[in-house]
Image: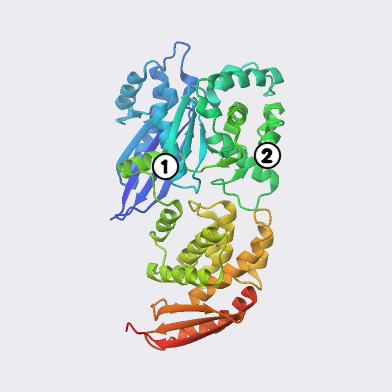
Amino acid sequence: MNSKIGIMDIGSNSIRLVIYEMTETGAYRIVQECKEAARLSEKVGANGRMEREAIRSIAPLLRQFMAVCHMHGVVRMRAAATAAIRNATNSDEIVQWIAEETNLTLEILSGEQEGYAGFLGVVNTMNVSDGIIIDIGGGSTEITLFRDRERLHTVSFPFGAVNMNWRFGREVKNGEWSPQQIEEMESFVRSSLQNHDWIFSNPGLPFIGLGGTLRTLAKINQKRLDYSLPVTHHYEMTIEDVNYFYGSLPHLPYEKRKKTAGLSKDRADIIVPGLIILKTIFEAAQGSAYLVSGAGLRDGLFHELVNAEQPVVANPLITSIRNILSFAVPVSEAHVKRVNEYAVRLYDTLASGTSAAMDKRLLLTAATLYKTGAALNYYHFRQNSVFWILHAGIGGLSHRETVLAALIADYHPKNRTPRLLRTHADILEPSDEERVHRLGSLLQLAIGMDRSESGMISSINPTTGDDALHLRLESKSEPILEQRELESVAKDFQKAWNLTLSWSILPSSNF
C-alpha cells in the first residue's frame, strides 16, 4: 500500500508544504504542494528576536497545512525551519511557541544541514557531476561545492534576498537602485567570501541555482526569448543572459518591474538583491554558466527522511523513469526493457563514437517512456507521450536531451517529427536532426520486434555487411505481428541509415 509523506519548509521568505506519495518499492511522486509568502526575516526585531505575535500571524497557515496533511493521510511528517528562525536570538523559544500554537514539531536546520539538503535535491535530479550550488533564500545564502557527485564544502551566509533588500534597499526610490547602492551591496557580499578560499579556487564550474531568484530569472528569460520548452528544471542561462538582467531590472521603477513577464508580484522587490548576490558570487567563483534546479531543500529533506543510510540515488535518470512507470502507466515493464535491450544491441552494431553514452541515455528514455501516453488515451498515446516526456521533469536530462527523447519516442518522419524539430529549433543543435532520424527509426525497429509485447522473439543477432543490416531472429512460434511491424518500419530505417534491411526467423533454441 502506498504511503504519504509530508515535508514542510518554514523559510525566510515563504512557507511551503509538499506531500509525496511513495510506493512500497520506493518510487515516489509529488501529489500536493502549497505555498504562502510570509517574509519571516522581516519580522525579526533590531534586538534579533522574533516575538510571539509574529508566530501567531503564521499559526493559522501552519494549522491549515497540517489539515491538508491529515486530509491526504500523511503518515510521516518532517517540518524544518531555515535562516529566519535559525538566526533569531530566541530560536528555541520560537520552536516552543509553534508547538503550543499548532502542535507542530519543528526542527531548525543549521546552515550546513540546509546546504546538504539542497545538494541532495540537485544530485538526485540532475546529470551534473561537478558544480557549485547556490541557494539564495530570504535570510541566508548557502554555497556548496561538489565533485564526482560528492559534497566537498558548504558555507551558509546570514544574508538573503529579503534581509539584504531591507539592509541595502530601504533608501531605494521608486524601486530604482543607484549604481552606488548596487556597489555597496556587491562590496558587502565580496567581503563575506574572503575566508573561504575554496570558492575562488574552483573556476569554470557551472552554478546550479536553487530558490526563487534564479528560478524567477529563468522564467523571465524564457518569456523574453519565447523559449519553446517552458520548464525551469535544468534550464541553462548564459553569462550574457544574467548580465542583461543585471543591466535592466535594478533600474526599472517598481511598478514597471512588477509587470515584467515571468516575474511574480510578491518577488518584484527582492529580485534585485537576489540578482546582486547571485552575480557577485558567480563572478568571484568564475563560474561558467547558470543552471536552474527545480529540486532543492524540500526534496533533500524527503530523501534524508526515507533513505537515511543512502540518500544519494545511484542514477537520477533511472530513478526518474522508475517513478514514472510506477504510477498508473499501462505499460509492461518487461516489454519496455526488451525494447531498450534490442535498441542498444542494434545501436552497438551500427554506431560508435563519442556520443554513444548520450545516445544510449536517449534510447533508454524513449524506449521506456514511449507508451506512457496510453494512460490518457491509448489511440493517441504517442502524441500524449511526447507531452509527458517534455513536461514530466525527467531527472537527469538536459532540456536538449528531453526534447530529443520525446522526438525519438514519437518518431513519425513524414509529419510530426519535422514539425517538432522546427518547434524546438531554439534548443536543438544542427546535428540533432540526423540523430533523431537514426535513433527514432532504430527505436521503431526495436519496438517492432516485440510488437505483441509477449517476448515472442526470444533473441536477436544483428549483423552488417555490404551496406545492409540483417537480423537473425529466434522466435518461440510464428511472430505474425512482429513481421508485419518490421515490414512497416523497414523503409524509414533504410532511409535513415542508408542500409538495406533484411531478417530471417528461426525456431527458438530455448523453447
Location of residue 128 with respect to 417 vertically, above or below: above
Location of residue 378 with respect to 251 vertically, above or below: below
Amino acid type at circle 2 is Asp
Q: Secondary structure at mark 2?
A: helix
User: Closer to us: mark 1 or mark 2?
Assistant: 2
Give the residue number, with chain letter if any, for mark 2: 241
Q: Quadrant of the C terminus?
A: bottom left
Q: Secondary structure at mark 1?
A: helix
Amino acid type at circle 1 is Asp
Location of residue 454 with respect to 400 vertically, above or below: below
- Between residue 48 and residue 421, name the one nearer to us: 421
One can see residue 502 in this view: yes
Q: Residue furthest top?
A: 47
Location of residue 183 with respect to 343 vertically, above or below: above
**What label sits on residue 389 in the rendered view?**
none
Give the residue number, with chain letter if any, for mark 1: 299
4 lies left or right of 43: left
Q: Position of residue 391 (x, y in %)?
A: 54, 54
Q: Residues within 10 Å of mark 1 (few under 14, many from 20)?
A: many
Q: Residues within 10 Å of mark 2 (few under 14, many from 20)?
A: some
373 lies left or right of 236: left
Q: Residue at x 46, y 54 (%)?
A: 317
Say if mark 1 contacts mark 2, CB within 8 Å: no
Q: Residue at x 50, y 49 (%)?
A: 127
Q: Position of residue 479 (x, y in %)?
A: 43, 86
Q: Quadrant of the N terminus?
A: bottom left
Image colouring: rainbow
- Between residue 279 and residue 137, name the one nearer to us: 279
Q: Residue at x 38, y 70 (%)?
A: 334
Q: Position of residue 221 (x, y in %)?
A: 66, 42
Q: Residue furthest front?
A: 465
Q: Position of residue 112 (x, y in %)?
A: 40, 29
